[in-house]
Structure formats: structure tokens, C-alpha cells
């Protein structure tokens, strides 16, 4: 029995292929409709894969055991709200009083700085001022050289750490260690080269420039009392929610905030990043999912309608086959094979379209990433569309009376 079915399927595939080539215009419109639906589906799947990978990358870069404390309440944009609320005293108190904290590092930033090495220059959007042990604070090992030391901070030395991409911009393939560059027209010695971070959407990390915090304050006339951002690291990353709550409680006490008063600071952990991107991903998946489902359903209805027309036009062919002994199963399988061949062809075109769309869509949050699973899912969806929307036209063809079909009477 199984051998007979396989034989029928083999013959049905051959006849279906010949029919697809014979009815080129119908085949074109079916494949076009299916490709549009599959392109939408492939983009949404690739977008979700890119979002998932971006979440992992951002958590890894941010640090699962880390938290940022920022001055000002980023969730409340009250008029006249102070953004400089974190002081040296706050940093010291967090370092000494918070359970499980082992790093409390204030950070300062300076925007729009020109870096120069001889005839090469690069306009940097932002450079960072950090305390000693930058690589430990940020879980970012050095490829060459040394880290910022306590003496660099004490003496406010003009030294810098560079990412690999900014190094390539300024030094090409040469080692920057011990070389001098100008940052905002002041000479700085490069003491360390950070390892390459890379990753989708994270290439800007490799343009990082870090100088001692004391040098930043002195050279660029930064505020000596307040800090916009402090990076905290905790021993137990599994309890980040509790660490965040403890930090908020301590800062509210230090700032003298009464119950009911809003925070004058913001605390961000990797959990917050996951939740934020998760919400974006959920909203995007719902929107794109509805769009893809609608497109696939439209392509299925186009396939069904064109196949109904095709069955009516090919009545004599179907009648002749049945008169020569073809079973209803053979006729059904032929039309289903035609539908599946067309939808698979449309799926291949749709994935190509989706990849082209992915190349033209650029997002700052995460990339659209195509993998083999996108192709497999698209083919599976195409086969399902062919079977679901092709079954009724196929059964209609199989149910024709041979004599009436030969006479062109297909109703």
C-alpha cells in the first residue's frame, strides 16, 4: 500500500511540474502572492532572532552583575528637574554601605572631541573619564598595555585607553602603546588597547576612548562635586532586584527624600534592559505577526481562487485522466503537488525578498539576522499554505465526473 502511494506521489510530482511550466502566468501570480507573505514572515522571524541576540549581547556588555545609577529621574521629566544629584559622598556611601557591592565607579563624559595622530584625525562623539581598573569595572580585558592606575588618577596624568576601531582610525595596523595622540589639542599617551568587542549593533563600543576621571575633570573643566553616572558591581548577580532596591533606599536616605517624593536618581540594571527590549520585541512581533498572517492568508486565497479557475479550465484534462483510470487520490495529489511546488517557489523568492528588505532596514537597537531556521520556517509555512488552500480545489478536481469533464461541464 505504501509503495503504491509513493508511486502515485512520484507520478503526481512529475505531472504537477509539467503543469507548473505549462501554465506560466498562473504560476507567476501564485508565486508572487506567496512570496509577499513569506517575505513578511521571514522578516519577522529574522527580526526576533536579531532581538534575542541583541538582548544577550547588551546584557553581556552591560554586565549581569552591574547597575548604573544616574542623576535625575529618567522616568519623570518634571520641568526644572535636577540631573546632577549624585555626589562623591553618595559614591563613598554606596561603596561602603551597600550589601554585596565591590565596585562603585563614578563616570564622566565629554562630547564632540577631536582626536589627532599626525595627519590622521577622528571626530569622536564622546570620550569617557573613569577611575582606576577600567577593564575590571567593565569586564573588558586589555589586548595590550596596562590599565588606568591609582597614580594616574592622583597625578591627573594625560593617558588614554583606546578601542580597536579608533586605534585603526588613528594608527592603522601599528601598535598604539606608548604613542602620543592629541585629544582636544592636548597630548595624551596611549597606555592600553582594549580587546575587540564586535557583535551586531555593538561596533561603536570599539570606538571607546577612556582617560582618567581626574584628568577629565581638570582638562575639560567638569563638575568636581556631582557625577551624572556611577557604575556599581555586585557579588551576587542573581539578586539584582534586591540590590537595586537597597541602592534606591540608601540614596533616598542620603538625599533626604520623604515618603511620597519621587526619586531624584535612576537605577538601571540588566533586568531593566531585558524588560525594555522585551517590550519592544513583543510589540514588534505582534505588529509584524498580524501583517505576516494577513499577507500569507491573502496569498492563500489568491492560490485557491486561481486553482479553482484552473480546475474549470482543465476539466477535459482531468476527465481524460479519470477516463483512463486515474484514481481520485491521484488527481488530488497532482493538484496538491502543484500547489506545494508553487508555494515552495514563492517561499524561496520570499526569503530572498526578506533578506533584501533586511539589508535596507537599519535599526540602532538590534539587527535583522537571517539564519537557516528562517529558511526552514518559511518553507514549512509555504507547504502549509499549499496544502490548506489547495485541498478544496484539488478535491473539486478529483470529484469531477469524467464524462461531464470531457464535455467541459465542470460545475
Image (tube, grey):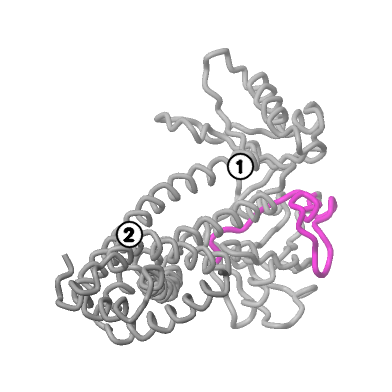
Identify the residue at horizontal 42%, vertical 29% (top origin): 78
Characterize the local packing of mark 2: few (<14), some (14-19) or many (20 or more) Cα atoms within 10 angstroms: many
Q: Is residue 340 left or right of residue 274?
A: left
x and y percentages locating residue 24 in the rendered image: 28, 84
Magenta span contains residue 196: no
Residue pointed to by mark 2: 295
Name the image quarter holding the N terminus. bottom right
Q: Is residue 353 shown to the viewer in this render?
A: no
What residue span does the magenta drawing correspond to? 124-153
Q: CA distance from mark 2 to mark 1?
A: 56 Å
Identify the residue shown where x is 71% and y is 48%: 63
Q: Relative to 207, is 244 above or below?
A: above
Residue 90 sits in which quadrant?
top right
Is 57 left, or right, of 299 in this rendering? Answer: right
| Residue 69 image position (x, y, % from top left) | 64, 37
Comparing 119 with 303, the one in front is 303
The residue that label 1 is drawn on is: 223
- Residue plotted at (82% across, 38% down): 235
Precedes in sequence: disc 2 or disc 1: 1
Amino acid at each position: 500500500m505504501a509503495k503504491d502511494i509513493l508511486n502515485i506521489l512520484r507520478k503526481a510530482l512529475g505531472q504537477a511540474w509539467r503543469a507548473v511550466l505549462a501554465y506560466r502566468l498562473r504560476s507567476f501570480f501564485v508565486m508572487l502572492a506567496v512570496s509577499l507573505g513569506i517575505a513578511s514572515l521571514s522578516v519577522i522571524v529574522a527580526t526576533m532572532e536579531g532581538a534575542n541576540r541583541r538582548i544577550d549581547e547588551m546584557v553581556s556588555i552591560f554586565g549581569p552583575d552591574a547597575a548604573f545609577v544616574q542623576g535625575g529621574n529618567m522616568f519623570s521629566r518634571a520641568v526644572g528637574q535636577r540631573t546632577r544629584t549624585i555626589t562623591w559622598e553618595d559614591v563613598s556611601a554606596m561603596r561602603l554601605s551597600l550589601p554585596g557591592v565591590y565596585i562603585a565607579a563614578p563616570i564622566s563624559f565629554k562630547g564632540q572631541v577631536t582626536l589627532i595622530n599626525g595627519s590622521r584625525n577622528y571626530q569622536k562623539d564622546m570620550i569617557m573619564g573613569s577611575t582606576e581598573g577600567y577593564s575590571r569595572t567593565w569586564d573588558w580585558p586589555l589586548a595590550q598595555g596596562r590599565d588606568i592606575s591609582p597614580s594616574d588618577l592622583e597625578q591627573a596624568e594625560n593617558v588614554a585607553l583606546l578601542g580597536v576601531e579608533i586605534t585603526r582610525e588613528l594608527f592603522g595596523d601599528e601598535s598604539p602603546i606608548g604613542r602620543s595622540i592629541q585629544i582636544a589639542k592636548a597630548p595624551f599617551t596611549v597606555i592600553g588597547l582594549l580587546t575587540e568587542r564586535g557583535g551586531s549593533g555593538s561596533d561603536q563600543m570599539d570606538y571607546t576612548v577612556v582617560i582618567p576621571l581626574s584628568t577629565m575633570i581638570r582638562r575639560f573643566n567638569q563638575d568636581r562635586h556631582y557625577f551624572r553616572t556611577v557604575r556599581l558591581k555586585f557579588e551576587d548577580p542573581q539578586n539584582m532586584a534586591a540590590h537595586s532596591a537597597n541602592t534606591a533606599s540608601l540614596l533616598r536616605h542620603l538625599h533626604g527624600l520623604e515618603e511620597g517624593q519621587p526619586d531624584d536618581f535612576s537605577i538601571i540594571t540588566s533586568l531593566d534592559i531585558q524588560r525594555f527590549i522585551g517590550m519592544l520585541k513583543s510589540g514588534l512581533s505582534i505588529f509584524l505577526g498580524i501583517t505576516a498572517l494577513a499577507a500569507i492568508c491573502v496569498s492563500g486565497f489568491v492560490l485557491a481562487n486561481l486553482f479553482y479557475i484552473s480546475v474549470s479550465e482543465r476539466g477535459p484534462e482531468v476527465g481524460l485522466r479519470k477516463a483512463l483510470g486515474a484514481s481520485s487520490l491521484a488527481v488530488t495529489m497532482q493538484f496538491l503537488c502543484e500547489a506545494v511546488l508553487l508555494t515552495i517557489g514563492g517561499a524561496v523568492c520570499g526569503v530572498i525578498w526578506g533578506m533584501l528588505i533586511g539589508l535596507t532596514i537599519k535599526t540602532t537597537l538590534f539587527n535583522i539576522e537571517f539564519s537557516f531556521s528562517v529558511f526552514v520556517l518559511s518553507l514549512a509555512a509555504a507547504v502549509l499554505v499549499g496544502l490548506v488552500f489547495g485541498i478544496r480545489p484539488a478535491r473539486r478536481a478529483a470529484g469531477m465526473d469524467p464524462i461531464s469533464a470531457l464535455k467541459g461541464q465542470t460545475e
